[in-house]
Amino acid sequence: MKPFPYSIMLNGKKIEIIAIPKPPGHYIILEALKKDKAANKGVNVISFCNKSNIKIGRGHDSEFRISDISVSRFHAQIIAKNGSFILEDHSSKFGTLV
């Protein structure tokens, strides 16, 4: 799988295809890659402004929802700590892959 192209080179100049807004404070950018080439890819900007962790899962109370049966209701969380990000699995059935 190839990552989503954010820019292209045209006549020796770098041109951004999409502009990703950068929120204030700590944030991460997650890219959704699919094995199926016909499936939609996506880019998600997740802000940690006023919070130290983001809950990931398919449950309605998840801050980052993934609608896939292989994803647990509370699958994992991303923790912002000392300028770094930690991905912590929440004992999910299939584990968490990066």
Image (cartoon, rainbow, N blue to C red):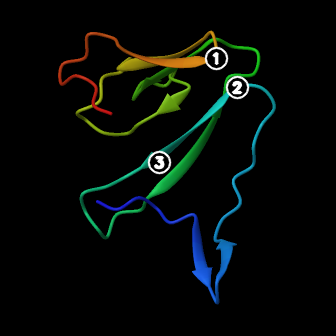
Q: Please state the total of marks drawn on the protein image.
A: 3
Whether tag 2 and tag 1 are in contact, CB under 8 A, the answer is: yes
- The label on residue 26 is 2
* Secondary structure of the residue carrying numbered label 3: strand
Identify the residue position indicated by label 3 in the image: 31
Q: Looking at the image, is mark 2 or mark 1 earlier in the sequence? A: 2
- The label on residue 32 is none
19 w.r.t. 48: above or below: below
Q: Residue furthest front?
A: 12
Between the C-alphas of marks 2 and 3, the distance is: 17 Å
Q: Looking at the image, is mark 3 or mark 1 earlier in the sequence? A: 3
Relative to residue 49, is residue 37 drawn left or right?
left
Q: Residue at x 31, y 70 (%)?
A: 38
Where is residue 97? Give x, y as percent.
27, 31
Between tags 3 and 1, which lies in front? 1
Where is residue 10? Give x, y as percent.
62, 86
- The label on residue 83 is 1
Between the C-alphas of marks 3 and 1, the distance is: 21 Å
